[in-house]
Amino acid sequence: MKIVVFGLGALGTAFATFLKESGHTVYGITKIEYEPLLKNKTLKVSGIWGNHEAKLDGIYSSVEKIKDDIDVVFLTVKSYDTEKAVQQIKSIVGENTLVVVAQNGYGNYETVSSVIGKEHTLLARVIFGSKVIKPGEVEITVNADDVRIGDPSKTIPEEKILKVACLIKHSGIPASYDPDVYKTLWDKILYNCALNPLGALLECSYGTLASIEETREVMDSIIDEIFLVTEKHNIQLNWENPQEYKKHFYENLIPPTKEHFPSMYHDIKAGKKIEIDALNGAIVRLAKEKGLKVPTNETITKLIKAKEKIKRGKFKR
Amino acid sequence: MKIVVFGLGALGTAFATFLKESGHTVYGITKIEYEPLLKNKTLKVSGIWGNHEAKLDGIYSSVEKIKDDIDVVFLTVKSYDTEKAVQQIKSIVGENTLVVVAQNGYGNYETVSSVIGKEHTLLARVIFGSKVIKPGEVEITVNADDVRIGDPSKTIPEEKILKVACLIKHSGIPASYDPDVYKTLWDKILYNCALNPLGALLECSYGTLASIEETREVMDSIIDEIFLVTEKHNIQLNWENPQEYKKHFYENLIPPTKEHFPSMYHDIKAGKKIEIDALNGAIVRLAKEKGLKVPTNETITKLIKAKEKIKRGKFKR
């Protein structure tokens, strides 16, 4: 198959290395500032899935140099770069091209499918941990579940989706077809919205957040507001009501990850841009569309944006 | 005059030293754990008002040992200790005793006057900066305005209030009578509620908070909610509406203190208890009494309480 991995960060480097190693034609798209660094580099993956390396068929900062008809595009940029990325991807989407949105949070699938069409857009929920050692080299730290892949719009034939799921799985990354991938992604959104910004603001682990009455109340409020918003938008969740989710959240999800600090915590400390607009910020946008108030998500979003600006020095004094 | 200073922290040490130095009989009440350290100590004040020292007529951990009829009690404990303190003070309040509530935030005057009577309770708004060097030794760092003293209930004759104002002023601490002391205290509450918790959460200066769009929006919301709550409680402020206050806040109050980090920031870092229940936490209580929602103050209060617990290690893991 002919594949483009759009975005060679922690996730994209892992996908590109495994896919190339399994024999496909793989092109990587990276940011212009990383192009000189990466263009002749052999990508490397270490960690829980062993050591892997691969030299791609081309690493560029734009899709212009790709002349092949592309079968699958993996979109692996951060959410704040999705709109820019999809404008480029548009030009390499042919009749049979599928784009796999393999990002965090809400809004990426919606943005991509609105530009290139639902019949070309697949959604993947990725939940393994990958850490950049240096550009082009990543370590797989943990795998919580298969990459789940599916079509929220139910317009793409199952056999095509299965083919992409097999492509990933055969490359060495656990993956499976998920007819309910949209609900599955929302499970991750719920979890990330409740834990990531608070862990980043208070600089503490998931277990600490669940141990303190006040942070539990704030997380409960974040979750309640998400159920309010998704209900008004007819977004189906895996849970009947907030109580059912909270029980699962505190009893099953937190305990095994209680020592974990959110990636948002590490990213803010490192002065990186934060994907809050695809998490709690997305809840605020969805609420505004329906005239709803989600003050907890709104305050938390603003505090994260402020903390990000302070750490990056991005404000006028 | 015979005076008790109840609470020998940053503020109480300054009051006790100046009052004793100016010739009065002054007893100090301190926490039981500080009694051995302080009982024979000469209190010391340094800083912008020069060097002062005084040996009090007694430093105890309870009022039981005080046999004199007391003219004035200065209540200088932190807000979270007010209820406990007033139960002790009750026993030394005679017919002519006045208690000066010289604390931060909302609720102290209300608590004290409800226990010992409005006719015995004066309110002081203290806005000079005092820093503990070590127990019994403080440094005066800044003076924003006179100690303003008055009677919110208008039941105490003016000449008695003036006498207490003069007592303070003649001891060397700038002070004046303020018929509108309740409004004056609320000005400080507004300022502290908007700036202190955010500066403590985001670990930044007042100027930074005012420079970032998102923190301005959160501060605006905190202020709006305070106006909502005070209006429903018929609490008079110095400002017709939130817009008028915000203009004053951003244009006049912030610029001269823009480099300042809130004391709450330093206190949280030092693992101290935080007076949030007399600030944003008080707004939440006042809102609940009237069935109002103040979600921004509520979230901010919970985040500060959580941060306090994390820094103090006060939670079950």
Image (cartoon, coloured by chain):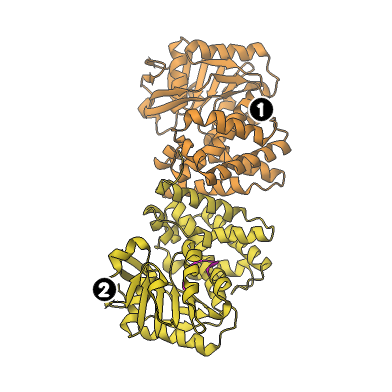
Chain colours: A yellow, B orange
Q: Percent x, y for residue B45?
A: 39, 20
Q: Residue at x 49, y 71 (%)?
A: A252
Left or right relative to B236: residue A242: left
Q: Percent x, y for residue A186?
A: 55, 70
Q: Is residue B163 above or below residue B180?
A: above
The amino acid sitting under disc 2 is: Thr
Q: Residue at x 55, y 58 (%)?
A: A281
Q: In which quarter of the view is residue B297 placed?
A: top right
Q: How many numbered circles does the render carry?
A: 2
Q: Pointer 2: what residue?
A: A42
Q: Percent x, y for residue A35?
A: 32, 65
Q: Residue at x 69, y 40 (%)?
A: B228
- Residue A301 in view of the camera: yes
Q: Which element is circle 2 on? A: loop
Check residue A106 for magenta coloring. yes
Left or right relative to B211: residue A168: left
Q: Label 2 lies in what chain?
A: A
**Residue B238 marker:** 1
The amino acid sitting under disc 1 is: Asn
Q: Percent x, y for residue B104?
A: 54, 31
Q: Label 1 lies in what chain?
A: B
Question: Is the stretch drawn in magenta largely helix, strand or loop?
Answer: loop
Left or right relative to B47: residue A176: right
Q: Residues within 10 Å of mark 2 (few under 14, many from 20)?
A: few
- Residue B68 in view of the camera: no
